Amino acid sequence: MEGFSPAWAWAVIGLLLALSELLTGAFVLLALGIAALLTALAVVVVDLSLTGQLIVMGVASGILVPLAIYKIRPMFSPKGVKYGTTGAGAETGKRYRVETMNFDQSINAIKVNGDLYRIQPVDDAGKPSEASISPGDLVMLMRFDGTLALVQPTD
């Protein structure tokens, strides 16, 4: 095909992946974009077959993606925040101040890692209780039931 260059194709793919990173913030697409740009560079320097191009892309991705996830991403994450662990029990036993939901002022919630969760008071056995909880009260997070935070009032 006249005018078609695999190097340009890899460069366009790399730029599209790098631009797509703006939507995620996970650094995976950025690493894949850099790997595609390195593949484009390899095609320009050494005329590679499609198999060679895929090998270069695979090796570059295999090195850059783990590097981005385990070394670079933590440098841009706030200290002490364990993303993806909210429902896994990382915050169990911590105290939170009750707030009201932005969209419905009648629903009480707590803010955990920047996200609001509806609350349900429970007793020591984990059964729903009739305890009265108002905005501004301190509660202790017992566990999550789906997206519902089960809490106990604290003194």
Image: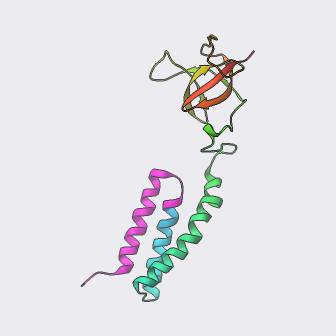
**155 or 4, which lies in front?**
155
Quadrant of the image containing the C terminus: top right
- Residue at image position (59%, 71%) is 63
Magenta span: 2-29
Identify the residue at the far bottom of this view.
Answer: 47
Side of 111 where 37 appears, left or right: left
Q: Quadrant of residue 103?
A: top left
Vertical arrangement, residue 66 with respect to residue 79, above or below: below
- Residue at image position (58%, 22%) is 119
Quadrant of the image containing the N terminus: bottom left
Vertical arrangement, residue 90 with respect to residue 32, above or below: above
Type of secondary structure dominating the magenta stretch = helix
Q: Quadrant of residue 65?
A: bottom right
Q: Give how far across and how far down residue 74 sits, in percent.
A: 64, 54
Side of 117 where 75 appears, left or right: right
- Residue at image position (51%, 18%) is 107
Q: Give how far across and how far down residue 14 sits, in percent.
A: 43, 68
Magenta stretch contains residue 119:
no
Q: Give how far across and how far down residue 16 sits, in percent.
A: 39, 63
**49 or 76, which lies in front?**
49
Q: Give how far across and how far down residue 33 sits, in percent.
A: 47, 66
Identify the residue at the far right of this view.
Answer: 155
Identify the residue at the far left of this view.
Answer: 2
**24 or 51, which lies in front?**
51
Vertical arrangement, residue 40 with respect to residue 129, above or below: below
- Residue at image position (53%, 70%) is 61
**117 or 144, which lies in front?**
144
Magenta stretch contains residue 28:
yes
